[in-house]
Amino acid sequence: MTQRVLVRDTLKLVNQIVRLSGWVHARRDHGKLVFIDLRDRSGIVQIVGGDVLKDLRIEDVVDVSGLVKDRPANLQNPKIETGKVEVEARKVTVLSHSKELPFPIDTDGYEIDEEIRSKYRYLDIRRPRMAKNLRLRSKVVAYIRNFLLDRDFVEVETPILTKTTPEGARDFIVPSRLKKGKFYALPQSPQQYKQLLMVAGLERYFQIARCFRDEDPRKDRAYGEFTQLDLEMSFVTQNDILTLTEELFTRLVKDLFPDKHMTQTPWPRFSHNQVRQKYGTDKPDLRKDKNDVQELAFSWTIDFPLFAEQSKEDFYYGSGQAKFAPSHHMFTAPHPDDIPLLDKDPLKVRGLQHDLVLNGFEVGGGSIRIHQREVQDKVFDLIGFTKEQKKQFEHMLTAFTYGVPPHGGIAPGVDRILMAILGEPSVREVMAFPTSASGQTSVMDAPSVVEPQQLKELHLKVVESNKKEK
């Protein structure tokens, strides 16, 4: 059997017999002649034939053998890469029939209800825009990985089953079968693990990390899970982190998105007070033309207050009696000049936090971390942690007694950055199988009811409430 070739290679194989495999993307019946557009992972090419093509339907999977021919100059299609050639079908084998699709896939898909797209996500991904987005995502992740490995970073995977700790959002908890009545938590981020890797002396760590937070969805945040570049370094200043991050994404945009242009380089840096006073937000959209999807305006926001006044919504911090909540998270280091204010006026203490902003979206955040146990203890006290809550971090506090280097890092969101660069309306447009706004996992009927035996093994019992939900 002739070896299969990809659609894009037909341009180099004029006057040769080739075998192509793919999906029937479109069909046009002109009587004696039938034209189909055949699609594979590399693109689309026109197939022409007679009876061998007559019974084909949209999205049938077929194997086509035929002669590659130049198309007449007046019939060439400049809209597709292979528009100068066509394949004269000699033999066609249907490998799999397709029934009628629940929605068209030859459009960008924005007009289709998202719940339906999510239910048939494997079909939605067939549309060229979605396939392109996922391929670009793969290239972005590979670029990031190679960039960091070339700079002596070590890629380390950290546990998914970990410990529930009050870190700023609701945890997803997982019951333990072996430890009766106890639970794991899915990580909101690898925050504690990456700091422990700095204690371990790796000095430069990264991973493309999956993170899990039980937070309400919005256009720049999917419900449940997301992906971030997690990065940590020892013996660095805040400027070191910002400079490395800026170099990474400046090069990435130039190499992978050559049609995009940056509003300003180097990226502007604003203090939190300055940017709020000037733009009314700490994540300003600095594009000169807000309608120009090719324009990328990166900026930094720094010098955040370390604390904010604690509100009723800060249920995950402290005993409810404290006045303060961390404005970022509880591991952010205070500005060295402001440490005396921890005892005098905590709300005036600046944190060594930095937020990465792109086109009005916060696409990453990080900080220099606390590396002295006594300072970490002080922050825990200020946010009202009880002795029991402090015990949840005893592993961290103990590690901090064994010689800890100053360290810090950043965690840009892969989904958010791609959404902003591509000008997509939601992070779900750059994810393969996102959870919908209603909390249902794409394609799967999840969350779902589990078998009674599973609950028994996990020492759990589901109790239905008699109270009507308001």
Image (tube, helix red, strand yellow):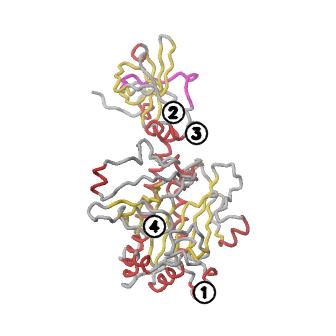
- Residue type at tag 3: Tyr
Q: Earlier in the sequence, mark 4 or mark 2?
A: 2
- Residue type at tag 1: Leu
129 shown above or below 396? above
Secondary structure under tag 4 reads strand
C-alpha gap between disc 2 and disc 1:
59 Å
Residue 56, picture quadrant? top left
Q: Are marks 4 and 2 in contact (CB under 8 Å)?
A: no
C-alpha gap between disc 4 and disc 3:
34 Å
Residue at numbered disc 2: 105
Q: Are marks 3 and 1 in contact (CB under 8 Å)?
A: no
C-alpha gap between disc 3 and disc 1:
51 Å
Residue occupying the point 35% across, 64% down: 183
Q: Residues within 10 Å of mark 3 (few under 14, many from 20)?
A: few
Residue at numbered disc 1: 341
452 shown above or below 371? above
**Closer mark to the observer between disc 2 and disc 1:** 1
Q: Are marks 4 and 1 in contact (CB under 8 Å)?
A: no
Which span is picked out in magenta?
63-78
Residue at numbered disc 4: 231
Q: Is residue 198 left or right of residue 104?
A: left
C-alpha gap between disc 4 and disc 1:
30 Å
- Residue 95 located within the stretch drawn in magenta: no
**Closer mark to the observer between disc 4 and disc 2:** 2
Q: Earlier in the sequence, mark 2 or mark 1?
A: 2
